[in-house]
Amino acid sequence: MNNNSAEIDDLAGRVAGVVLLPGQDGYAEECAMYNPAVANNPAVVVGAAGPADVQAALAFAKAHDLAVAIMNTGHTSAVADDRTLLITTRRMDEVVIDPSARRARVGAGVRWQQVVDAAAPHGLAPLNGSSPLVGVVGYTLGGGLSATMGRKFGWSSDHVTALDVVTADGTLRHADAETEPELFWALRGSKSNLGVVTAIEFELFPVTRLYGGVLIFPGDQAEAVLRAYADLTAQAPDELTTSIAFMRLPDVPVFPEPLRGTFTVHVRVSFLGSADDANTLLKPLRAAAPVVIDTVADMPYTDFAAIYSDPESPAPFAESTLSLPPLTPDLVTALIEAIGPQADVPANIIELRHLGGALHDTPANAGAAGLREAEFVLWVVTVGVPEQTAPAVHWMGELFTGLKPWALEGKHLNFIGQEDLGPEAVRAAYPAQTYDRLARAKAAYDPTNVFHLNHNIVPSVTDAEGR
């Protein structure tokens, strides 16, 4: 882009937020992502303060033949180069709680801890993820797998009641079950493919406390722990949401000091019930191997982040994901051979998040996201810049090939890494009928593929009516 100062000044005059160019104060901070391994160097960045700013940014991008990328809080990577206009939405940070309706309405820049803190005085809680810093909108448009209450209440996207979105033509639309119902369905699973969501409304739940925390075991006990975990999840009530993670952590400051440079197995626990019931469920697991750390206890819901203790500081990483069935003995054996203490594993975190329960349900108002058949999401993460993570990325491919006999259709959209953005990989992330319907919605709302710097859904050659 040839920077015409008069045109940039005109854009800045029409935007209530900020307009920044490379080299200007605040540009690097505005473009910074949680994963700095992904380059983000747009020709111009518009820090939108509201829908009108988004509309002005889209009009400017169209006039100057610029691609468009969207970034909410930075946890979903937005790849923007010098032919791109980046729209950031973190300034849209309003949170409104309606306690009588048990709903929240939040702006596109709101993070989960803000919602949790705002809902708690009313005795309510949202279906948030494991990290307090993740943005509500990006998380929810990818389905939203709640690490605290997912098995009890289902996918976060299925509890959305309305969205405001600026589509590719610059129109601000309100989408709910009655108004723009197809857009309403498609937004909840297409991530940033159909427009810039500026606000979202969703249900809250009457929950104030959890019985939760983490059980940490020595890595050399991985097989015993995984087999006990398989038994636990095979008969777990819906009130119990858990995951198990094999953690080979490098000695870097982003991780807690006692765990740096060690191999440990973490079982994360969130239970909506009494301490006695939780301890009965967890007793066989605690007896399976020596417990190094046990923090499982009663806690206010506002302390949910202590269960996973996700890193707060940005760090470069690569990731990939797979969907799996229940942990049968043969699958456990395959996993231990591939990722257990005797395996040569270059990845740092290999996690299995338990699905099932209400996550298997397909309510009448369900969106396009959600793994309705899988029992587990396998998520693999390795820390480092691309040159450092290349061996681990290659190993991930080998791991997934070895697990192919058990692999199921679909992927959790929020765990798709930069290596899985090719057309066939994106298509494989959805059931065939879902992808085809999304492609028709894309053709209706973004026929020229303005929003393609993402896990891109290509517009169907037919229109939204199937003609």
Image (spheres, rainbow, N blue to C red):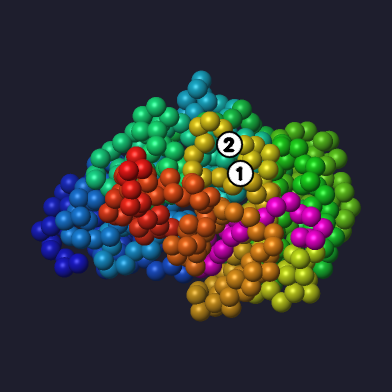
Mark 1 element type: loop
Q: Along the line of sight, which residue is nearer the eye, 12 or 220?
A: 220
Could you tell me if residue 448 is visible in this image? Answer: yes
What's the residue at 58%, 36% (across, down)? 362
Residue 372, which numbered label?
1
The quadrant of the rendering that contains the N terminus is: bottom left
Using the numbered discs, state the Cα–Cα distance from disc 1 to disc 2 in whole angstroms. 7 Å
Question: Residue at 50% across / 62% down in the picture?
Answer: 425
User: Which quadrant holds residue 252?
Assistant: bottom right
Counting every numbered tag in the picture gives: 2
Q: Which residues are magenta?
A: 310-332
Work out whether residue 464 can be spotted.
no
Can you name the residue that lies furthest to the front here?
467
Label 2: which residue? 362
Residue 379 vs residue 45: left or right? right
Q: Badges 1 and 2: C-beta atoms under 8 Å apart?
A: yes
Q: Sequence order check: which comes first, mark 1 or mark 2?
A: 2
Report helix, strand or loop for mark 2: loop
Say few, some or many: other residues with alpha carbon within 10 Å of mark 2 (under 14 / 14 to 19 / 20 or more): some
Residue at point 49%, 43% (across, down) = 368
Q: Residue 257, position in %: x, y?
A: 67, 65
Q: Which residue: 50% across, 32% down?
A: 365
- The kind of residue on which mark 1 rests is Arg
Q: Is residue 331 magenta?
A: yes
Residue farthest along the top direction in this orientation: 100
- The answer to which quarter of the image holds residue 22 is bottom left
* Residue 213 position within the rendered picture, expressed as x and y whole percent measured from the top left: 72, 47
**Is the residue 383 above or below the residue 427 in the image?**
below
Note whether 204 is above or below 215 in the view shown. above
In the image, taking residue 457 as reference, residue 283 lies left or right, namely right
The image quadrant where one finds the C terminus is: top left
Q: Is residue 3 magenta?
A: no
